[in-house]
Image (cartoon, grey):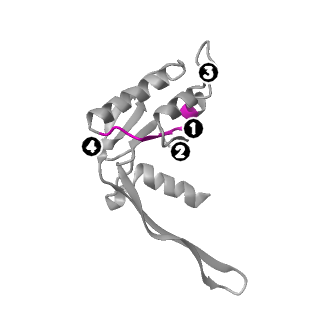
């Protein structure tokens, strides 16, 4: 689980020490400041604003949406007077998927934003022992190659 969390952190926030950007930090991305998501219609309004930014940049989908846990969980409310969950509604717009991620706010991504390049898939190995304890290691190499930062729009809370 720790490796998966580190992979996600790397994809969303990059590795500044190595000059690598993530989806949330890519220079040239669009940004939307969001309203109060406790209001049922606000989530859709903010995501539509992000979609409009990407459309203006020439990226018309399909889209994926990653949200902080608190924002994702708020999507399990129904619109007033209907049986439709906000999550179901957004999944129609974000055809690649709507995902919960350990990020602040949200990020909307067109499929052409970039790709993940795997240099070496996750592997484990034996390092040494001291007669009682055995030392093991885990190794992996990957990089997010942001090819079209204009295909990314982050959504952040006010302030």
Numbered mark located on residue 28 in the image: 4
Q: Secondary structure at mark 2?
A: loop
Earlier sequence position, callout 1 versus callout 4: 4
Q: Secondary structure at mark 1?
A: helix
- Of 136 and 80, the residue lying toward us: 80
Callout in the foreground (2, 3): 3
Task: Locate residue 11, reporting x and y percent.
Answer: 44, 53
**Would you name the residue on which mark 3 appears?**
78
Q: Is residue 98 above or below residue 134?
A: above
Quadrant where the N terminus lies? bottom right
Task: Locate residue 41, reporting x and y percent.
Answer: 50, 19
Q: Is any part of residue 159 visible from this angle?
A: no
The residues colored magenta run 59-72
Tag 3 near tag 1, CB within 8 Å: no
**Would you name the residue on which mark 1 appears?**
69
Q: Is residue 132 left or right of residue 121?
A: right
Could you tell me how many numbered marks the image carries? Answer: 4
Q: Residue at x 43, y 64 (%)?
A: 142
Local packing at callout 2 (Cα closer than 10 Å; few below 14, some 14-19, many 20+) is some
């Amino acid at each position: 689980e720790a490796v998966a969390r580190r992979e996600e952190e790397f994809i969303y926030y990059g590795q500044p020490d190595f000059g690598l950007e993530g989806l949330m930090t890519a220079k040239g991305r669009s940004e939307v400041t969001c309203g109060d998501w406790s209001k049922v219609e606000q989530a859709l309004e903010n995501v539509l604003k992000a979609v409009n930014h990407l459309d203006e940049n020439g990226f018309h989908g399909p889209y994926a949406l990653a949200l902080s846990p608190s924002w994702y969980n708020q999507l399990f409310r129904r619109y007033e007077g209907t049986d439709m969950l906000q999550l179901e509604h957004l999944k129609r717009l974000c055809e690649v998927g709507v995902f919960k991620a350990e990020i602040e706010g949200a990020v909307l991504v067109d499929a052409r934003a970039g790709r993940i390049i795997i240099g070496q898939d996750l592997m484990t190995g034996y390092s040494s022992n001291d007669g009682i304890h055995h030392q093991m290691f885990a190794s992996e190499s990957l990089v997010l190659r942001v090819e079209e930062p204009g295909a990314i729009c982050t959504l952040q809370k006010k302030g």
